[in-house]
Image (cartoon, rainbow, N blue to C red):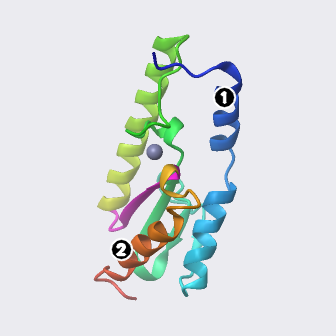
Amino acid sequence: MDTVDQQTRSNIMSRVKSKNTSPELKFRKGLFARGFRYLLHGKLPGKPDLVFPQYKSVIFVNGCFWHGHDCPRFRIPSSNVDYWKAKFERNMANDKRNHEALRSLGWRVLVVWECTLTTKKISASIDQAEEWLVSADIHL
Ligand SMILES: [Zn+2]
C-alpha cells in the first residue's frame, strides 16, 4: 500500500511549502556560480522561481508532492483521498495553465523537480539547466 504516515506527510508538506528550501538554494547558487543572473519569484504567470530575462526563460523548482510528479516522492495520502486527488488535480491544472500562459508570452519554461536536486543528482541537474539556458535562441 502506498501510505505516508502523518509525521512524514507533515514533514513533506512543510518542506515543499516554503520557498528557498536548501536544495533550491543550492541549485540557484550553482547557476549563479556559472555566471547566470536571474530574478526571483517574478511577477509572471505562476510566479516562476527563477526568471532569466536575458534568455527569455523561466525555471520552476517544483516540489514532487504538491505538483504531482510521477516519482516515488509523490503518493496520494491514504486518508481524505478525494480531497487530495482534487487538490493535486487543481495544482497540476494550474501549472499547465501557467506554463501555457508563459509560452504564449514568449517565455521558455523549464520545470526542475526537487527529486533531481539530491546531493547525488544536483550537479547533473545544474548542468542540464545550463545547457537548456544556453540553447535559447534569444540572447538579448
Ligand atoms: Zn519527483
Looking at the picture, does residue 78 appear above or below residue 65? above
Q: Quadrant of the N terminus?
A: top left
Q: State yes or no: discs 1 and 2 in contact (Cβ < 8 Å).
A: no
Please, what secondary structure does the residue beneath circle 1 have?
helix
Question: Residue at the location (71% across, 24% down)?
Answer: 7
Per the rendering, the mark at residue 38 is: none
Q: Which numbered disc, 1 or 2, marks the residue that appears first in the sequence? A: 1
Question: Residue at the location (57% across, 63% down)?
Answer: 42
Please, what secondary structure does the residue beneath circle 2 have?
helix
Give 127 or 98, whichever is nearer the viewer: 127
Give x and y (percent) for residue 49: 56, 60
Mark 1–mark 2 Cα distance, whole angstroms, equals: 34 Å
Say which amino acid is labelled 1: Thr
Looking at the picture, does residue 79 appear above or below residue 139? above
User: Mark 1, residues whose alpha carbon is within 10 Å: few (<14), some, or many (≥20)?
Assistant: few
Question: Residue at the location (48% across, 77% down)?
Answer: 53
Give x and y (percent) for residue 119: 59, 61
User: Mark 2, residues whose alpha carbon is within 10 Å: few (<14), some, or many (≥20)?
Assistant: some
Say which amino acid is labelled 2: Trp
Between marks 1 and 2 in the image, the one whose residue lies nearer the viewer? 1
Give 34 or 94, whichever is nearer the viewer: 34
What secondary structure characterizes most of the magenta part?
strand
Range of magenta residues = 105-114
**Residue 24 colored magenta?**
no
Give x and y (percent) for residue 135: 31, 80
Q: Residue furthest front?
A: 120
Q: Quadrant of the C terminus?
A: bottom left
Question: Mark 1 sits on what residue?
Answer: 8
Question: Residue at the location (49% across, 25% down)?
Answer: 87
Q: Picture quarter containing residue 70?
A: top left
Question: Mark 2 sits on what residue?
Answer: 132
